[in-house]
Image (spheres, grey):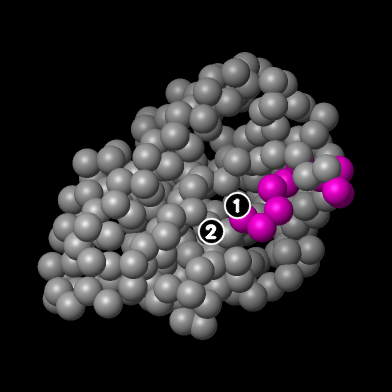
Amino acid sequence: MASLDPGQNWAFVDDALSRAGVDLWGAATNVPTLPLAPALPTAISLMASIDRRALTRLEQGDAAAYHAEYRRLNALLDGAVDGLVAVLQKRGSRALGTPATVYRSVPESGDWLAAGVFAHKTAATRAGLGWIGKTGLFVSPEGGPKVRLATVFTDLDLDVGIPVTEGSCGSCRGCLDACPVGAGRDVTWQAGMPRELLFDAAACERHLDSLEVNGDHTCGLCVAACPFGRSRSS
């Protein structure tokens, strides 16, 4: 494991991610190892904000801009992941990156969700960056669910955040009312809660499958409806 002071480590990681266009990041412990994560002790959660203009056009019935923004942020985060892994390895740390989630067909099940992909929002909540909302979205106090996530795992010594273990949506029903298939259950997320108690993922998946255009399965109406981060344009 790299021997620099955690504060010095934090500074060079922050510099690398800022240069790559990452808006916010935090570190979480990966001990015990999170599901589908490599056995490295620290998870670095990366966050990039969705341009509000794409969400406005989505609400007006134009999904193309949101699809394009989704792809742009995935590419930005994947580049940031690769860049940070290279910097960490050059400095003598072990590091493995997991890219932004891309949904793809799984022939064995007929499902469009990629199998075996680490859940980035798990690292983000453990890093103290936010919570899980009523339709299963990661929600940041700064950006709401209007963000994309990726994760880098490393043995670098970093100060870790205080995990968020409960949702802070209160009585808000924005995402619930916006969901065209009523996938949310209107319950407050608790860390470790089975997903089916919070959110009907199968209903969401069927709806997304019906929206496929040129390989895109994104809906985003619940993202646009959330009041957290609504004032941000990018």
Residue furthest right in the image: 109
Image quadrant where residue 11 sits: bottom left
Q: Name the secondary structure under disc 2.
A: helix
Q: Mark 1 points at which residue?
A: 137
Q: Mark 2 points at which residue?
A: 121
Q: What stretch is highlighted in magenta?
A: 108-117
Q: Can residue 172 be seen in this view?
A: no
- Main secondary structure of the magenta stretch: loop
Q: 72 left or right of 204?
A: left
Q: Is residue 228 above or below residue 186?
A: above
Residue furthest bottom in the image: 32
Discs 2/1, front: 2
- 110 is within the stretch colored magenta: yes
- Viewer-side residue, 230 vs 127: 127
Give the residue type that dot 1 points to.
Leu
- 92 is within the stretch colored magenta: no
- Viewer-side residue, 148 vs 177: 148
Give the residue type that dot 2 points to.
Lys
